[in-house]
Amino acid sequence: MANAIEVQGVSKMYGRVQALEDVSFSVGKGEVFGLIGPDGAGKTTLYRILCTLLLPDAGTATVDGFDTVRQMREIRRRVGYMPGRFSLYQDLTVEENLQFFATLFGTTVEAGYDSIRAIYSQIERFRDRKAGALSGGMKQKLALSCALVHSPSVLFLDEPTTGVDPVSRKEFWDMLGTLKERGITILASTPYLDEVRRCERVAFLDRGRLRGIGAPEVILEQFRDIFNPPGIERRGAGCVAAPQQSTRPENVIEVEHLVKAFGSFHAVDDISFSVKRGEIFGFLGANGAGKTTAMHMLTGLNQPTSGTGTVVGYDIRTQHEQIKKHIGYMSQKFSLYEDLTVAENIRLFGGIYGMKDDEIARKTDELLERLKFDDHKNDLVSSLPLGWKQKLAFSVSIFHEPGVVFLDEPTGGVDPATRRQFWELIYDAAARGITVFVTTHYMDEAEYCDRISIMVDGKISAIGTPDELKRRFHQPDMDHVFTYLARQATRSAD
Amino acid sequence: MKQFFSFVLKEARHILRDRRTMLILFGMPVVLMLLFGFAITTDVRNVRTVVVTSQMSPQAQQAVERLSASEYFTITATVATPQEAEQLIRRQRADLAIIFAPRHEGLQLMVDGADPNMAQQWTNYAQQVLVNRSSSVITSKLLYNPQMRSAYNFVPAIMGMLLMLICAMMTSISIVREKEKGTMEVLLVSPVRPLMVVVAKAVPYLVLAILILTTILLMAHFVLDVPLVGSLFWIVGVSIIYILLALSLGLLISNIAQTQLVALLLSAMVLLMPVVMLSGMLFPVESMPQVLQWVAAIVPPRYYIEAMRKLMIMGVGIHEVAREVTILSLMTLFLLTVALVKFKTRLAD
Amino acid sequence: MIKYLIQKEFLQIRRNAFLPRLIILFPIVIMCVMPWVMSMEVKNIRVSVVDHDRTTQSQRLVHQVEASRYFIFCGQEPSYQAALAQVEHGTSDVILEIKDGQYLIAANAVNGTKGGMGSAYLSQIVASAMEKQVDGKTALAGNGPQGAVLFLYNKHQNYKLYMIPALFAIIMMLMTGFLPTLNIVGEKEAGTIEQINVTPVSKWAFILAKLIPYWIIALFVITISLLLAWSVYGITCAGSLLWVYVLALLLALFFSSLGLIISNYSDTMQQAIFVMWFFVVCILLLSGLFTPTRSMPHWAYLTTYVNPMHYFIDAIRTVFVRGGGFAAIVHQLIALLAIGILMSGWAVQSYKKNS
């Protein structure tokens, strides 16, 4: 059998929704094969069928020469699978999680250590900490370690690097390279274009159909509108865009020697910076560098251990309730109410910020028109695709015209075209004078910011405009700047 | 085998790490045993009694003395008219009034009839105290539980309820949690047999159930002085059949439920309510309408509680509970078969 | 802004596939089934008779036992041993042995109430039969002029009348206790609470917005229950309905606050439900809902002073069964109000917007 995976005319329906329609392709032994496509394209369904977790309605699939319907046990003995919403056992420690999964796959941590060294070594010093206490990106790294600890003949990875910082993503793909050398076939999906390029071949799925298959460059070129939308031109120029501020630049956020300690561990270790009104400020850093903790202190969710700071003129230690009136916030985890409709969510948050009914109604219509959401006004949020949800969540967070809006990885797991639309919204907001404070792991987005800071080990190691930073560190683009700085890190989790 | 133990270890860690749930799991039997053993009694005691008389006749005086001498009644007030007494009862200041009619020999009892059982018992006791009945030809004997301690009745019932709760509810929730969090997918797509995943999940709960059973039995014996007259071997034996039954039920629920909330509600509504209400634990099944008695006939704890009452308190031999044990075994066999046949080795759509 | 938050809670309840059905069906099912189940009325006691005398007198007694509404006659047994075997086998509850004009009543008292009541009823029948025999009069032992009994309020000794107020309490407790418990933990697990925490919503507004829907649900549920009690069982409130509603609101205040407190301190739904369940069982058992509180030992009786359910059940039975007015329940009203305010204050206090 030459091919590791053979898919022939596979279809699958969920009720009346066609998740997969007549999909056929094959993957050779030892190939790194990418599966790309927007949210809801049917990637997860395909993974589940190949892993024998679901039965196809029509068509056949074989993995390593075994039929997914009849030879379930043979396949399960041979494959490794990391689902998209892979979650660890939160109440077990890092080491216990790893040991459990190693034993589950009939191996030991020692035997599989080589294949996970690059990533696991970053979190190894937290081996006695409970998985639930790790930051989002750290959890993902542990999950990767758990998935790679054994050596299956076929490895299925469903968006394994969502929320992982660029440096760790590179390391992860290097690891996949070594697995390939050992003859392991890898089927991976990803929203990151740099990762797509590291596959040997990719298949592009869209709404259940296979739209194209071939070398990454060919596919990316063929569907350029979707994967490589033209860059955005900023209307107006940066912080001077806000008309009333052009003469008197005012600092909306000012932070001096801010520290947050959990016991002896300093998650945020003496940071100072300021953000001007109307600016788009990119707050970058590796997983566990302390970004989310810093943001929580600025938004009044957390009390600083020491240091001072003001947001829109209020003290973050004592006046956090006043701050909350003048800021917007969009958290990492999507946090609108899924069981309310689009209009109801807008109305709720408008009401919370003390807006009047007629004002809410008027602005809701405006907003929906701008987003081209008119038809979906009364749809439940849970029924919207991820990209739409994110755009909606952002619009809701600036609905009350706050002085500053905090965005914590707003575009995680979103396809390139939607990300571009998202950034248009950000530019719109900045043009209206709303200061934007954003964290991201996409370095192309970092280029869109007026100024950025890069956090390493709880400290800010660089701050400036993207061009200044590239010049200062003699690097061609932000990706390299980031990699250069993050590689100097000594600690690896918050 | 190594994988199996690693599973059991992991599951045990989940249980041990959740301190609050652990505390409730072990605190619950202890608190319930203490409450039922000491606090919850239907004994007639401290009945607040009002004496209604315009003037104390010697006869009334004698009756009042006899009442207050008994441990059942406390005289709280003396009023002149029945209306005043009724006011007191209405305001919950008294339960019973004894009315000595002026210029008459007789007396009348006025009782708060809100709770018919207690009202009946209060009047029975009051009459016994007030009237010397010449009933020497009647001898009453209360078998097995001469002091009418409610603990004798409730210990088997608590066992029936808690074992069901822990085994069925906890097992189903812990399996469904893995489904909800997505870890079940990884476990299924591993070389481990799916069935072993589930069996390994059940083992810690089996151990936990046996520990709790031991706690209950020890407390029953040493703290509540409930006799364990029957054979310990059979008590434990029948309990294990019952635990297996509960585990199969838990497995069955986890097959149906997709979210923890549904599993919780299913266990609470479909398991807990019938167990508490229809098992004869609190309310006698034979007083219920026929339809409910039929429903009660398929509630497994009913047979377990019945068997435990007979084995533990009455001390009968195993042949006397053969019927209950047979029914329980058949139910276990049936549920286990259904649960295993229905067990999904793939994801549900 | 609280208006919007309350609206949101109602929308969420309505959108839930399960909750609206639960809110309507639960009281109906409970009210239609439970009064039949929760009867501690002792009846259908199975009697085995061992009649060694075989006189006309003993025959007549046996007929009387058969005719009684409390007993089911299981048949004659040749010896006491044979009858005891029946008891051990679980097919009989009480043995009546008649030998040389002496009567022995032996009751299975594993269930104390049943055994005690059974033997009491049986001895009443025997005693009255004997008195008839001896005096030829119609006077009964328990009903003679010496001790006429007047049952107040519940004249027909209807156990359902006693239990229905208790059912109100149970329905209220489950609806207004468990639903709020799941609510905040649910928002925690979904991550939406973080979004709320960065808005200027005050703690009071947030908690009140969570509580008010459950009070309205409480009023709705108690109305259904009252209607059912009237239409199915013909049982109506003896006192003023106003006080039934006031009491229901106060109880809802306590239980919804308790639910929110527990969910504020819990991380997972499972944990919250278990803790809530534990408290509910203790509160229920020590409230006097099933058993008289005054029979409790002193230490257990002391706990009833802080048990809102105890005040509620006392007061609602006073209003519903005994027909008491404000003066009769003022003490309970004050206690319930005080406990309720304390608990809702704690609920607000324990909700942390900032750590």
Image (spheres, coloured by chain):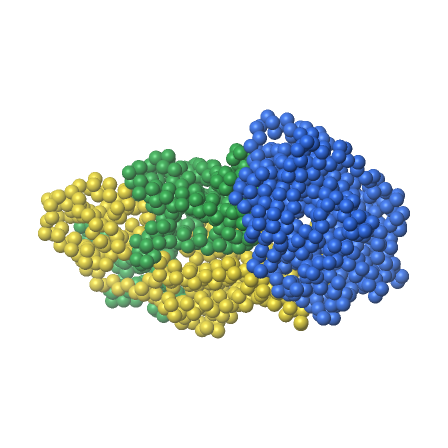
Chain that appears blue: A
Chain that appears green: C
Camera-side residue of B234 and A76 = A76
> Hey, which quadrant is residue B10 in on the image?
bottom right
Camera-side residue of A224 and B169 = A224
Tag count: 0
Note whether A464 is above or below B329 in the view shown: above
Residue at 40% in and 45% down? C342
Residue at 84% in and 51% down? A197
Note whether A73 is above or below C286 in the view shown: below
Residue at 82% in and 63% down? A178
Is residue A65 rendered to the left or right of residue B330? Answer: right
Determine if residue A443 is in view: no
Determine if residue A94 is in view: yes
Chain B drawing hue: yellow
Is residue B5 rendered to the left or right of residue A198? Answer: left
Q: Please state the horizontal and vertical placement of residue C248, each as a whole percent of the image.
A: 41, 40
Camera-side residue of A322 and B328 = A322
Q: Please state the horizontal and vertical placement of residue C305, each as a whole percent of the image.
A: 33, 50
Q: Please state the horizontal and vertical placement of residue A314, each as a whole percent of the image.
A: 56, 40
Q: Please state the horizontal and vertical placement of residue C262, each as a whole percent of the image.
A: 49, 50
Residue at 35% in and 46% down? C311
Note whether A366 is above or below C90 in the view shown: above
